[in-house]
Amino acid sequence: MNNSESTTEKEVFSMPRIGDKAPEFKAVTTQGEINFPSDYKGEWAILFSHPADFTPVCTSEFMTFAHLEEKFNKANCKLVGLSVDGLYSHIAWLRTIKDKIKFNGMENVEVKFPLIEDITMEVAKKYGMIQPGEHKTQAVRAVFFVDPESVVRAIIYYPLSLGRNFDEIYRALIAMQTSDKFNVATPADWEPGKDVIVSPAGSCGVAEERMTSTEDLTCEDWFFCTKKLDKDLVLNEVLKS
Ligand code: BEZ
């Protein structure tokens, strides 16, 4: 291996982690210029990347996200897409989707959320969306959940060949909002209406209290306590925020 090869191999792309402030950038999009995350302060944002315009999996994903956009907006969440393609390619692709593509019962789908042009890969590199082991220039399917304080709260990565599950993306958003509002955790496969987890006892005294509590708790053991949380209460709180 010569020197230049070893430098290329060693190129490291940074990646924000859960709990970090979302890295800042200014970008041109199909809806005009945006400043991220400052334009989204006070609301949630989902920043997601896709490998390339005019590819079938990405097309199915964009149609699905566009179809669900209002549902995400009602949960105080805006969508922002990105690929390492130029603005005119983005515009042409979105026009083609609207005019020609039918998928999963959807047609005539207009993508109204911003799609970032990132030919320089500046944003993709900042967010670790380029994973050289998968592809040197195409972004993987990354999903960043950024909260109203501009903090990265969850990250999901998928390989190029795997289309995302948008029910899970919505479920994760609502679950995090529920944790914030009600100071609880959410167990496996949680959805609004299902029992939530009360944070684990941090002392022997609390553990004992939990087991003998007359409060509305169900404790399988001192460390595993759940309580009911009304579905309408969750949805009213989350959807009004
Ligand atoms: C697609 O979106 O269809 C795709 C993109 C890159 C590699 C494989 C599939």
Image (cartoon, helix red, strand yellow):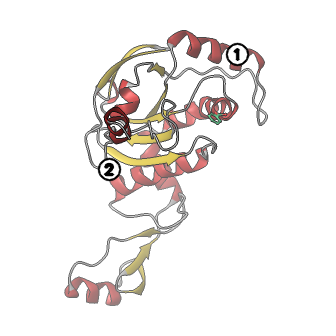
Which residue is painted at 41% across and 42% down in the image?
A: 145
What separation in Å lies between label 2 and label 1 (alpha carbons)? 36 Å
Disc 1, ligand 1: is the CB inside 8 Å?
Answer: no
For label 1, count other residues whose C-alpha is less than 10 Å away and answer few (under 14), some (14-19) or many (20+): some
Ligand 1 quadrant in view: top right
Q: For numbered disc 1, what is the local secondary structure?
A: helix
* Quarter of the figure with the C terminus: top left
Give left or right: position of 175 versus 37.
right
For label 2, the crowd category at 10 Å Cα-Cα, with few meaning under 14, some 14 to 19 and many 20 or more, is: some
Amino acid at the residue labelled 2: Ile
Q: Which callout, 2 or 1, points at the residue further toward the start of the chain?
A: 2
Residue 172 is tagged as none
Quarter occupied by the N terminus: top left
Give the residue pinned by disc 2: 18
Question: Who's the residue at 40% across and 78% down the image?
Answer: 225
**Residue closer to the observer: 55 or 75:** 55
Most distant residue in the front direction: 2
In the foreground, 43 or 116 = 116
In this rendering, would 46 be left or right of 61? left
Give residue 7's position: percent from left, percent from top: 32, 36
Which residue appears at 37% of the width and 18% of the height?
A: 27
Residue at left offset 21%, top offset 88%: 204
Which residue is label 1 attached to? 96
In which quarter of the view is residue 215 placed? bottom left
Relative height, residue 95 to residue 155 (above, below): above
Amino acid beneath label 1: Thr
The kind of secondary structure element at disc 2 is loop
